[in-house]
Image (cartoon, grey):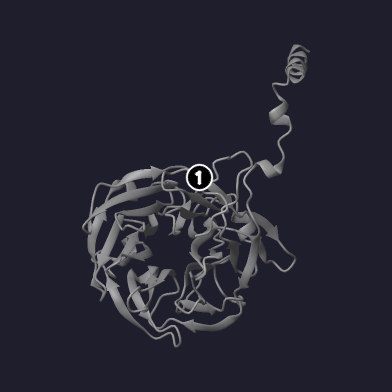
C-alpha cells in the first residue's frame, strides 16, 4: 500500500511523466528492412557479400543449413540491383565453406576466402574458375580466415578469427605475413570467432576490426603502413561481425546476435540502430535480419545490403542462441536491403549526423 501511495505521489508531482509518455517514435528509428533477394532452393546460409564494380551484389555461402554442414564446392551467387539472380557458379577447387569476399581496388579481381581450406582464391565471377591467391603458414584446422579489406596501395588484409591475426599480402598475393597478432583479436566468447570484419578509415591511419565473441571493435593505429598497438575502440555490439565505413568514417557494424546494424561515429558513439528480426512467413522466408553477417553499400550510397547467415549455432556444436530455433525453421535464405540513412533522434538537437547518407 505504501509503494502504491509513493507511485501516486510521484505521478502527481510529474516526476514519472516522461517515462510513462514515451512512444516508439522516441526510440531508435530502425527503418524498413526489405527482402532484397532470396537464394535458390538448396542454398546454404549466405555469409560473404560485396557490391561489385558493376553494381551487382556478389554473395558466397558458408556451407551450413538447418541440418548441418554440406559437402561439395562453395557457391557464388550474383544478383542485379533489383535482386534478380543473374547466375550461380560453383567455385572450382574450393570447399563448401566460403566466407569473406572482396573486389581488389586496382585490378577488380574477385577474391574469395575459402575458410575450409585456409586460403584466399581469385575467382572468375562468370565461370567459377579459381586459382590460389593467398596462403598462410598456419595449418587449415587451426586457422579461421574470415574477412578481408584493402589499403590504398592494394595490399590485402585478412582476419584470422582463431589465431587473433591480421594477415597481409601485397596486391599480387602469395604467402601472407603476420601484420598484427594480439590478444584483443582472440576470444573465448560465443560465437567463437575473434577477429572478423575489418575496414580502414578514409585517412588510412586506422584499421577497425570486429571481435565477434568479445562484442568489441578494436582500433589499430597505422603509421606509414606499419601497425601500432591495438586498443578496444568500443564495446557491447552483440556479435560484431562485418564492418563497412561510410564517407564520414561512421562504422556500420552487423551485430549478428542482436539482428541489427549498429552505426557508430568516429568517436565511438552509437548514432543509429537499424533493422531487426521480423519473423518468418508461411513459406519459411525470414523477414528483417537474422544472424546478419556482411554489409556493403550500393554504388550510389542509397542502400546497405546485408547477408543473413541464419546460422543455428547448434549445428556447429554450440549451445543455442536466441535465434537458433528460428534459424532451424528457415527454408529459404535471404539478402536484406536497408536505406542507408541515419534517422534523426527526436531529442537530438545538434543534427550533426542526422539524416546523413554514406
Element on which disc 1 rests: strand
Q: Is residue 334 above or below residue 233?
A: below
Q: Give the residue at x 27% y 62%.
A: 167
Residue at (27% x, 71% y) in the render: 135
Could you tell me residue 12's position as x and y percent? Answer: 77, 18
How many labels, in total? 1
Query: Could you tell me which quadrant the N terminus lies in?
Result: top right
Left or right side of 84 for 235:
left
Residue 17 locus on image (x, y percent): 72, 26
Q: Nearer the viewer, residue 25 or 144?
A: 25
Res. 329 in view: no
Q: Label 1, on which residue? A: 270
> Quick one: 11 or 184, which is closer to the camera?
11
Taking the spot 32% from the left edge, 71% from the top edge, the residue there is 119
Residue nearest the observer in this picture, 292 or 324:
292
Q: Residue furthest top?
A: 2
- Crowd tier of the residue under label 1, counting other residues whose Cα lies within 10 Å: few below 14, some 14–19, many 20 or above: some
Q: Which of the 4 image quarters holds residue 150?
A: bottom left
In the image, residue 132 sits, relative to residue 138, either above or below, namely below
Residue 114 can be seen in this image: yes
Seen in the picture, residue 42 relative to 223 is either above or below; the reply is: below
Residue 98 placement (x, y as % from top left)? 43, 71
Amino acid at each position: 500500500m505504501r509503494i502504491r501511495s509513493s507511485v501516486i505521489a510521484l505521478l502527481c508531482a510529474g516526476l514519472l511523466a516522461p517515462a510513462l509518455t514515451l512512444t516508439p517514435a522516441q526510440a531508435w528509428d530502425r527503418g524498413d528492412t526489405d527482402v532484397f533477394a532470396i537464394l535458390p532452393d538448396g542454398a546454404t546460409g549466405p555469409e560473404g557479400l560485396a557490391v561489385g564494380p558493376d553494381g551487382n551484389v556478389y554473395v558466397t555461402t558458408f556451407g551450413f543449413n538447418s541440418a548441418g554442414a554440406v559437402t561439395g564446392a562453395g557457391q557464388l551467387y550474383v544478383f542485379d540491383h533489383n535482386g534478380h539472380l543473374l547466375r550461380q557458379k560453383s567455385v572450382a577447387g574450393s570447399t563448401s565453406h566460403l566466407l569473406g569476399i572482396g573486389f581488389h581496388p586496382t585490378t577488380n579481381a574477385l577474391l574469395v576466402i575459402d575458410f575450409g581450406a585456409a586460403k584466399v582464391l581469385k575467382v572468375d565471377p562468370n565461370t567459377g574458375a579459381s586459382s590460389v591467391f593467398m596462403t598462410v603458414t598456419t595449418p587449415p584446422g587451426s586457422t579461421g580466415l574470415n574477412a578481408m579489406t584493402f589499403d590504398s596501395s592494394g595490399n590485402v588484409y585478412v582476419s584470422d578469427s582463431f589465431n587473433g591475426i591480421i594477415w597481409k599480402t601485397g596486391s599480387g598475393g602469395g604467402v601472407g605475413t603476420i601484420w598484427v597478432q594480439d590478444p584483443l583479436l582472440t576470444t573465448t566468447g560465443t560465437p567463437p570467432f575473434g577477429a572478423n570484419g575489418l575496414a580502414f578509415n578514409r585517412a588510412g591511419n586506422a584499421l577497425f576490426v570486429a571481435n565477434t565473441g568479445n562484442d568489441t571493435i578494436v582500433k589499430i593505429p597505422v603509421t606509414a603502413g606499419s601497425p601500432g598497438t591495438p586498443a578496444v575502440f568500443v564495446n557491447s555490439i552483440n556479435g560484431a561481425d562485418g564492418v563497412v565505413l561510410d564517407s564520414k568514417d561512421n562504422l556500420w557494424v552487423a551485430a549478428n546476435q542482436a539482428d541489427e546494424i549498429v552505426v557508430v561515429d568516429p568517436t565511438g558513439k552509437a548514432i543509429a540502430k537499424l533493422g531487426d528480426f521480423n519473423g518468418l512467413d508461411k513459406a519459411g522466408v525470414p523477414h528483417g535480419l537474422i544472424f546478419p553477417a556482411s554489409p556493403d553499400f550500393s554504388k550510389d550510397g542509397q542502400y546497405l545490403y546485408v547477408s543473413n547467415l541464419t546460422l543455428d549455432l547448434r549445428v556447429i556444436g554450440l549451445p543455442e542462441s536466441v535465434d537458433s530455433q528460428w534459424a532451424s525453421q528457415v527454408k529459404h535464405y535471404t539478402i536484406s536491403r536497408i536505406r542507408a540513412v541515419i534517422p534523426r533522434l527526436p531529442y537530438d538537437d545538434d543534427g550533426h549526423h542526422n539524416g546523413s547518407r554514406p
